[in-house]
Structures are given as C-alpha cells and as structure tokens.
Image (cartoon, grey):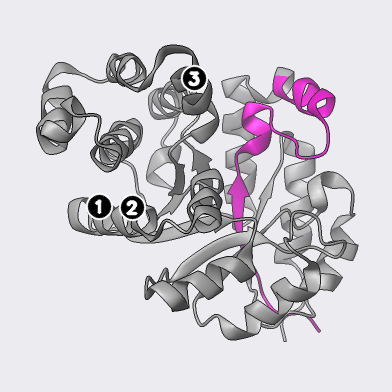
C-alpha cells in the first residue's frame, strides 16, 4: 500500500525547460507556451485534485497571469508557489549591461507608483550598488508579477541558493528569508540541488527554512553529491521536503518513480511538470488514485 501524495504542478514545460535535452525543451515549448494550452493543463490538474502550482518568475509569467485572469477564474482556484529571482535572465543581462542598466530594464515593466515604492524601500543601497539592497529590489519587482494571487510559499531559486551555499555566504539566505517574512508575511522556502550541504549549513548558520524543494529520484539525477547522501540528510531534516525531478526529466517512468518515492517515508509532496492535457490527466489521476496506507 502507498501513502497519499500532495502533488504540485510544475511550470518548467510551460516555458520550454527540460533538464535532459534542449531540443526536447524547444519542441515542448512550441505547444506549451500557447497560453490556451497552459490554461487547459492547469484545469486538468485541478480536475485531478492538484491545486498548487509552482511558478518561476520567467519573463513571460506576467503575460501568462494576465491571460489566466482575463480568460478564466483559475487564479481564484489555485495556490501559487513562486521561485525567484529568475536567475538565468539576470545573469545574462548583468553580464551584457551591468547591474544598474539591468535594474532600469526590469523596473520598466512596473507601474510608476509601484516603481517609486520599490525604490523607496531599496533606499540609497540601489544608488550605491549595494548587492543586498539590489537583491531586495529584484525580489519586490518579481513579486509584483503575482499581485492579488493566492501565494503560499515563496522559494529562493536554486541557482542563488546553491551559489550562497558554495561560497559560504550566509547573508543571502538571511536577507531573502527576512525580506519575505517581514514585507509579505508569507512562508519562505528554498530550492537546492545540494540538499546535504543545505541541511549542514542551516544547522551551522542557524538559518532555518521550514520547506525545501529538492531532487529525489531513483537514479540520483541532480541529487548532489549523491543519492545516498541526500537520503541520509532527509532523515536529519525536520521540515517539509517537496521532491522535484522525480522522473529525472522523463528518463524514468511514473510507476518506477513512485515506487522509489514510496521508500522515503518523509516525502509526501512532489512537483511534476507536464505540457499536455493528455499527460496531465494520466499522471495526476494515477498518483491521486494510489491506495492510501
């Protein structure tokens, strides 16, 4: 007998992300970036008991949210768990244009009043190029994309999390946690591809995150430094773990994936992305109909 799982819908296929193949990602994105298709996939997920959606703050997210609000009542029915900041976009922009020009660019998508509020909170740090004040400003800009949405947990992007862990920069995690809790009164989580290092650093730095999204799958895909070490750290961590990459980017089938997850008693929540209604129906109905323990 299997335990009952809570399932989140992941957005990677919506925006053409596949961890195994860029070609697969491009082919999927042709279909999935059609907003009508995304709406249909989310509706199918809801019909099969999935009411939580993980969104990265992709440049197209604001347009997608506007479309969903204008063409359905779906935003009233789903819980959103954003992952931010959208690191991939900022890295290339900063390299090409510098931090201040990048900031001007992203502020261009925000209304005048909101822009003034964000810059006022950033204070002189923005002018002085203070990294942490700029970091807070980027968070605020990206949160505006989800205004008036039912936001549950705000996650720090794994690129930022793992960079902070690798460099030993405790303050990045502290600033993110404090900023979200103080200004938005929301639960804070982190995404990581090095769960053991995160667990170790949280204990060492006394910075606790109640929810962690990280990879768990049978072949150890994106489970750094190894599957075994991640499984050992799972026993030590007292918070909630949301398993991602459970099918290793499509390399493992659903049945095999669920069999592995059933061997990990502390995992009862997982995130799965899909770009088609047919696959969403099959995947989510299969998981929701697993017999309970």
Q: Residue at left 79%, top 27%?
A: 22
* Residue nearest the observer in this picture, 116 or 172: 172
Q: Residue at left 77%, top 77%?
A: 291
In the rendered image, the vertical position of residue 207 relative to residue 41, given as above or below: below
Find residue 28 and report its horizontal and vertical position in percent.
76, 26
Specify the quadrant that holds the C terminus: bottom right
| Magenta residues (range) | 1-29
Mark 3 crowd level (few <14, some 14–19, many ≥20, 10 Å Cα) = few
Mark 2 crowd level (few <14, some 14–19, many ≥20, 10 Å Cα) = many
- Given this view, does label 3 or label 2 mark the residue nearer the observer? 3
* Residue nearest the observer in this picture, 263 or 46: 263
**Which of the marked residues, 1 or 3, is nearer the chain's N terminus?**
3
**Which of the marked residues, 3 or 2, is nearer the chain's N terminus?**
3
* Residue nearest the observer in this picture, 143 or 35: 143
Disc ID at residue 176: 2
Find residue 132 and report its horizontal and vertical position in percent.
28, 43
Check disc 1 and report the residue beneath it.
Answer: 179
Find residue 273 and report its horizontal and vertical position in percent.
68, 44
Q: How many angstroms separate mark 1 from mark 3 (CA)?
A: 26 Å
In the rendered image, the vertical position of residue 232 relative to residue 173, given as above or below: below
Q: How many angstroms separate mark 1 from mark 2 (CA)?
A: 5 Å
In the rendered image, the vertical position of residue 72 relative to residue 253, given as above or below: above
Q: Is residue 270 visible?
A: no
Magenta includes 147?
Answer: no
Res. 34 image quadrant: top right
* Residue nearest the observer in this picture, 57 or 91: 91
Disc ID at residue 95: 3
């Amino acid at each position: 007998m299997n335990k009952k799982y809570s399932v989140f819908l992941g957005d990677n296929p919506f925006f053409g992300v596949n961890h195994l193949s860029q070609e697969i990602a491009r082919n999927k994105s042709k279909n999935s970036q059609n907003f009508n298709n995304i709406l249909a996939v989310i509706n199918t997920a809801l019909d099969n008991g999935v009411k939580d959606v993980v969104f990265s703050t992709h440049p197209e997210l604001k347009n997608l949210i506007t479309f969903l609000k204008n063409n359905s009542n779906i935003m009233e029915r789903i819980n959103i768990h954003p992952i931010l900041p959208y690191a991939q976009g900022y890295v290339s922009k900063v390299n090409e244009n510098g931090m201040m020009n990048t900031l001007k660019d992203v502020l261009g998508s925000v209304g005048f009043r909101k822009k003034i509020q964000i810059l006022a909170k950033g204070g002189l740090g923005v002018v002085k190029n203070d990294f942490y004040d700029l970091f807070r400003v980027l968070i605020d800009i990206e949160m505006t994309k989800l205004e008036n949405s039912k936001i549950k947990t705000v996650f720090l992007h794994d690129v930022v999390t793992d960079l902070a862990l690798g460099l030993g920069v405790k303050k990045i995690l502290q600033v993110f946690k404090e900023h979200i809790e103080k200004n938005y009164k929301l639960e804070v989580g982190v995404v990581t591809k090095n769960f053991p290092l995160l667990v170790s650093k949280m204990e060492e730095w006394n910075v606790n995150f109640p929810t962690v999204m990280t990879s768990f799958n049978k072949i150890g895909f994106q489970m750094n430094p190894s599957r075994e070490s991640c499984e050992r750290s799972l026993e030590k961590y007292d918070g909630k773990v949301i398993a991602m990459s459970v099918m290793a980017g499509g390399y493992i089938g659903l049945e095999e994936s669920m069999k592995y997850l059933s061997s990990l008693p502390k995992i009862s929540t997982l995130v799965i992305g899909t770009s088609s209604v047919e696959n969403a129906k099959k995947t989510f109905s299969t998981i929701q109909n697993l017999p309970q323990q």
